[in-house]
Amino acid sequence: MFKNNYLKSWLVIFLCLVLVLGFFTLNCLAAEKVKAGFIYVGPIGDLGWSNAHEQARLVLEKTYPWLETVYVEAVPEGEVEGVIDRLINQDNVDIVVTTSFGFMDGTLNAALRYPAKIFFHCSGFKRAPNLATYMADFHQVYYLDGLIAGALTKTNKIGYVGAFPIPEVKRHIDAFTLGVRRVNPKAEVNVRWINAWYNPQAAKEAAESLISEKIDVLAFTEDSQTIVQVADKYGLPSFGHYSPMYKYAPDHIASGQLVHWEVIYLDFFAKVYAGFYNNKNLQNVDYWWLMKEKAVELGADFGMPINSVYQEQLKNFVIEDSFFGKISVFDLVAKLQKEMADPEYTFSPFTGPIYDRQGKLRVPAGVRLSMEELITIEWAAEGVVGPWPGEPEK
Amino acid sequence: MDLEFWIVTTLNRALAYGTPILLATLGEIYAERSGVLNLGVEGMMILGAFFAFCTTFFTANPWLGVLIGALVAGLASLLHAFLSITLRVNQIISGLALTMLGLGISGTLGRGWEGKILESTIASVEIDYLSKIPILGPILFTNQNSLVHLSILIAFGLWFLLFKTRIGISIRAVGENPAAADVMGINVWKIRYLCVFLGGLLAGLAGSYLSVAYQPAWASGMTAGMGWLAVALTIFAFWNPLLGMVGAFLFGALYHLSFRLQNWVAPEILNSLPYLFPIVVLIIVARFASKKRIGAPAVLGQPYKRGE
């Protein structure tokens, strides 16, 4: 009996040693890896913003064998600092990626507190030596969608359901409206706000109320497929947002905005791994990637810029364009898409002369709005109808 | 735009959006009339919504989905019934627990269900000959779901049952004075269990309407506070099914108008308007109406124990 116990305790000690050594070797192996933590504001199940980032994270992890990633979803904007603390202290991450504008100050605070770590914040404007920012912006894609919408409307009333009246959404509605007016100067864009990024019911009722007002094309900024489905129910063309939404209305979705966050992530992480970016030189690193970097794409699904259902109609809709002369909207979309994807970036939707809806000249002829001006835009383009909180005085 | 068009389109949407609130309110009215306060409406609704969606997804039969959704929520309500009627625990805590449980379970199971497409749903219908009736036709029978019609019928039926039948008298007696009702030979426990179960079924029906008829999709937390609104509307309705219908559709109209009127009134104010209205009503109820006259059950929230 005694001998048996004696053996047992030796066995236990031996096993403990194996475990400790095992963990030690595992740790050594892991040290060669880079570990990144992603923080999402929404649930990854939504079909919008957070889901798009999650898809990109999966691509990233698959592409780089040296990279290990973890994520935390549905983080309230005020609690981001605590989550960062946890990722760094418990999960030992080297790079923290925060993917919401509201995480900006929390990320900056954490960046100052952990100078040895690297931070990457989406859609903000505050940076530090170890904090870079990035954004894939849709305004070019929205402009192309606007061209299509302007050609598809018969009532000359287009509906737009917006999330929050902030510069980002206003910029997109302005770009959309500028596109609409280029091909159809009589059309107007009716805007309704739901004051939420994700609220399917509000999106649905906002769309229904617009349809009551006789609009016949729908675009939106909200993180679900709701509006595409409502439009489908009434047989109206709509534009998907963030994720491929073709499958929800194959007969009626015209096009939409798609994002490729992975393009930005792949670039940034490779540069960090190569030592090109480190915790000392990120003060001026700001990705503002558009069509030419292939960070955004026009379409209801990847590789499908315009739904074939509407191609005929767009080819038959011929306008007298001030730049191209007589041209069909289908060709116009293709031409401008090509110009914006061009490395020289030969066309910008925000090229003057542009007037706001109060008649004030906002962009003088021949001038192109800078990125700074675009990210702080507040005015409503000519053709926008409806409430516009924060509209500048005339 | 002319007034008739405004009224018709607003009421049409008021019915569509107010229906789940109406169903949940009717259920809560019955539970409370029998003396049981159930704050678990939100949780039961979301369970109903989720299970209706799943069932419809697998079987492609939305009506079976509605049935399962209602039954699951009904079963969940029995948990509250057991805790509050048999074990006599605090009804507020038990109800809150049910809400949290429902939201938690549906949220966990619902992962990966967002964005799924249902093959068949309960579609809105246009009833040809009925939709030609002036005013009422376009409100009730154009682009309206058959569950909307069903819930209006249920409201009338439950009003009749509560105020015009012996069963209704028994239910109200149990909520007013369970000891006296017990002496009269009414089975207090049975009545309360049945009323709470009915409340669960109706809450589940409300949730099912949301996920397979109103907007056929699953989204975690999709009931978005409708269950809480039902609890508030129960008081607004003075525990009367017909007034409950008025309240639910009034809320639906306000919700629709909160988008419709944005051209004239700031959206932030409008978006909060529908929720301001129950508060105002509660203040009025508290200020002007005495408890007896408006139909509040005398023993609401109090467990019954024979001989006390």
Image: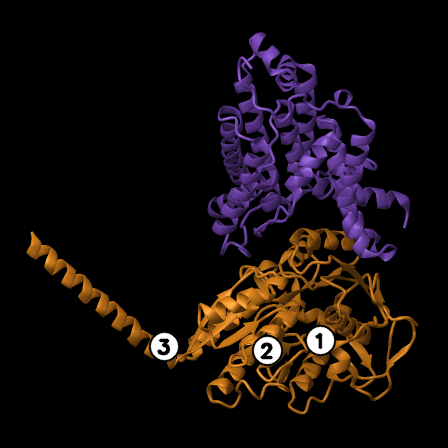
Chain colours: A orange, B purple
Residue occupied by mark 3? A30
Could you tell me how far apart the alpha carbons at marks 2 and 1 are, in whole angstroms? 32 Å
Residue occupied by mark 2? A112
Could you tell me how far apart the alpha carbons at marks 2 and 3 are, in whole angstroms? 26 Å
Please name the residue shown 69% across and 40% down the image. B229
- For the residue pair B95 and A390, the one nearer the viewer reads as B95
Disc 3 secondary structure class: helix
Q: Is residue B117 above or below residue B246?
A: below
Residue B31 position in % (x across, y down): 61, 27
Instruction: Specify the amino acid type for callout 1.
Output: His
Residue occupied by mark 1? A139
- For the residue pair B289 and B13, the one nearer the viewer reads as B289
Q: Chain of mark 1?
A: A
The answer to whether residue A218 shows anywhere in this view is yes
Q: Residues within 10 Å of mark 3 (few under 14, many from 20)?
A: some
Are labels 2 and 3 assigned to the same chain? yes
Please name the residue shown 75% across and 68% down the image. A166
